[in-house]
Every structure is written in structure tokens, then in C-alpha cells.
């Protein structure tokens, strides 16, 4: 069994904590957060020491297609990715940069992650890691559902969530205008084995399909940072275990045409067309993942 992040990097956390700049409390006024270059040095170290050189991106030309549509045609770009660990986002950026292609390096610099508030509000060291990357911070629906408090406190939290998420939509619109590419983990949380609900796409992902021109789906096979089953809510206890990572990109999908096609295929009495649209997208990701799993099994 590997080491936890805390065991391997705890001393380094203490040394670099002073470079942190990100807010410990998210509001509608601070939920677009640019990457902190000093914090990124730490995240880069963690990724390079953990991800094997054998790792690869398959169908890289699909990401080039998305990049070209954003940079030369002025269209908006969206990446929907599977989510298994807190290394998923930095490994995507790292592996793009590692291709050595100038466009891929520029693409990595343009990607903005949609991140939940927990990364900022869970503690100083988790926040330090999160601020290594540019992100738009949202109040996830799962966090709203699990909030504990009096009826008055719950109502106040509902209003806070609305303000933060409305500001996030404005921030994403500005990202699109600047030629940035939004990356979303549609399940909204890391997948926990045995808990299939953590792999189901969130209903609100349907709004992204309405707001963006093009998307690429990314399946992620291999996981270098596994959730510690004894302390699943403590991100610093996640276990580092180097393993080959394979990122597979789908062809570029035109969002509105895709959404229209799925909705038209649904029965007239479908109780929730929005969720059905997201479920179909997650089905594609599952199929991509399973196909790559079979390839990896044959290679062993």
C-alpha cells in the first residue's frame, strides 16, 4: 500500500503554506480564482512524482479539434471528464503539456475547472492544492442537500448557494469570451467503488449542454490517488499509488445537436428529459472506460 498525501508531503505543505492566497470562504464575489503559480509548483511536483511516463492520451486529435474550434472559430469549448481522484484535473493538464505540442500546452493554460467549495473551505492545505489551478467555484447540489441546520439556517444557505451559482454562470460566460475552455466532472464527486450513485451525472449538467457549442468527453483509466476507505472525507489521507494513466478523448460533440437528438429519442412520458440527457452522456463515458479497461487487461 502506498503513502498518504499527508505522510509523503506533510512537511512540504508546512513550508509552502505561506504562498496561499485563495479565500477560505466562498462568496459570489470571489468564486472565479486564477491559478497561483507558486502553489502550482507543489502540485506539479506531486503529479510528476506519481504519474508514470507510460501514461498517455488517446485520440489527442479530438482535443486538437476542440482547441481549433475555440481558438480559430470563436466557438465555446467544454470538457466532460470522469472523476476518480483529486489528481484527475492536474494529470489532464500535465499530460497535455507532456505531449510537447505547442497547441496542447496552450490548451492546458486555457482550461478552467468547475470546482466545489469544499476544496477551498476544507482546510489550508487542501485549499493550497486547489489554488494551483484556475477554477470557477460552485455550490454543488449535493452539498446543499446535506447541509445541516435550523430551517432559517437552511434557507440562508439556499440563498447563498443561489448567489454563488449565479455568479459562477456569469464567470463561465466571461471564460467563454476569453477563449478559455471549461472542464467539468459531471458526476460532481469522485467515484466511490460500490456506490454507483457517485458515478451518476448530475441533472444540472444539462444546462452546460445548452450553454456550450462543443464538448469532448474524457474517460480516465488508472488511478494514482485512491480514496482511503477508512477516512474517505479526509482528502489528505488519500493514498498515492503510481499507476499508468490512460486518458481517452471522444470525438468533438456539438452540444445542442447532441442534446436535441437525445431528447427527440425519449418517450413522450419521460419523467425527466434533462436527467435522461445527462444519463446518456454518462453511458457513453462508461462505454469508453470499459473499452479501455479491456485493452489494458490484454496488455498486462
Image: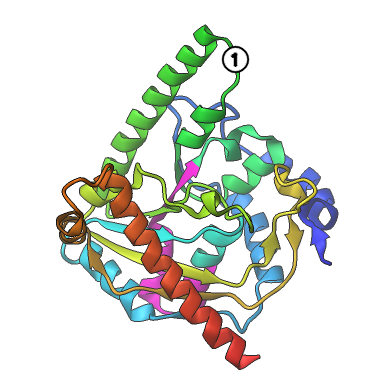
State the residue in front, 96 or 217.
Answer: 217
In reply to whether residue 285 is colored magenta, the answer given is no
Q: In the rendered view, does 13 fall on the left or right side of 53? A: right
Between 30 and 209, the residue placed more toward the observer is 209
Q: Residue at x 71, y 72 (%)?
A: 242
Horizontal and vertical percent for residue 95? 52, 72
Q: Is residue 192 above or below residue 57?
A: above
Judged left or right of residue 182, residue 100 is: right
Q: Position of residue 225 (x, y in %)?
A: 68, 61
Image location of residue 105, percent across then percent down? 43, 69
Q: Which residues are magenta?
A: 94-115
The residue labelled by disc 1 is 149
Query: Is residue 28 in view?
Result: no
- Image quarter for residue 165? top left
Q: Is residue 104 visible?
A: yes
Q: Is residue 282 above or below residue 164?
A: below
286 versus 30 height, above or below:
below
Query: Which quadrant is home to the C terminus?
Result: bottom right
Amino acid at each position: 500500500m502506498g503513502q498518504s498525501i499527508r505522510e509523503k508531503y506533510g512537511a512540504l505543505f508546512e513550508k509552502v503554506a505561506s504562498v496561499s492566497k485563495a479565500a477560505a470562504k466562498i462568496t459570489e464575489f470571489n468564486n472565479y480564482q486564477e491559478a497561483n503559480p507558486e502553489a502550482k509548483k507543489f502540485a506539479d511536483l506531486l503529479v510528476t512524482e506519481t504519474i508514470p511516463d507510460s501514461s498517455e492520451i488517446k485520440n489527442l486529435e479530438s482535443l486538437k479539434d476542440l482547441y481549433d474550434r475555440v481558438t480559430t472559430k470563436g466557438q465555446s469549448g467544454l470538457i466532460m471528464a470522469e472523476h476518480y481522484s483529486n489528481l484527475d484535473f492536474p494529470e489532464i493538464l500535465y499530460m497535455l503539456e507532456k505531449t510537447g505540442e505547442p497547441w496542447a500546452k496552450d490548451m492546458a493554460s486555457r482550461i478552467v475547472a468547475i470546482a466545489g467549495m469544499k476544496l477551498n473551505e476544507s482546510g489550508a492545505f487542501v485549499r493550497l492544492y486547489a489554488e494551483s489551478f484556475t477554477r470557477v467555484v460552485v455550490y454543488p447540489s449535493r452539498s446543499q442537500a446535506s447541509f445541516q441546520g435550523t430551517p432559517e439556517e437552511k434557507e440562508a444557505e439556499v440563498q447563498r448557494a443561489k448567489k454563488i451559482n449565479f455568479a459562477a454562470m456569469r464567470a463561465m460566460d466571461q471564460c467563454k469570451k476569453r477563449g478559455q475552455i471549461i472542464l467539468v466532472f459531471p458526476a460532481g464527486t469522485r467515484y466511490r467503488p460500490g456506490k454507483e450513485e457517485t458515478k451518476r451525472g448530475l441533472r444540472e449538467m444539462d444546462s452546460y449542454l445548452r450553454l456550450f457549442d462543443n464538448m469532448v468527453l474524457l474517460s480516465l483509466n488508472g488511478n494514482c490517488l485512491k480514496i482511503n476507505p477508512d477516512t474517505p472525507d479526509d482528502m489528505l489521507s488519500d493514498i498515492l499509488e503510481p499507476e499508468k494513466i490512460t486518458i481517452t478523448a471522444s470525438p468533438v460533440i456539438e452540444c445542442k445537436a447532441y442534446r436535441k437528438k437525445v431528447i427527440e429519442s425519449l418517450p413522450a412520458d419521460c419523467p425527466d428529459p434533462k436527467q435522461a440527457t445527462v444519463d446518456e452522456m454518462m453511458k457513453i463515458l462508461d462505454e469508453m472506460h470499459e473499452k479501455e479497461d479491456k485493452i489494458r487487461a490484454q496488455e498486462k
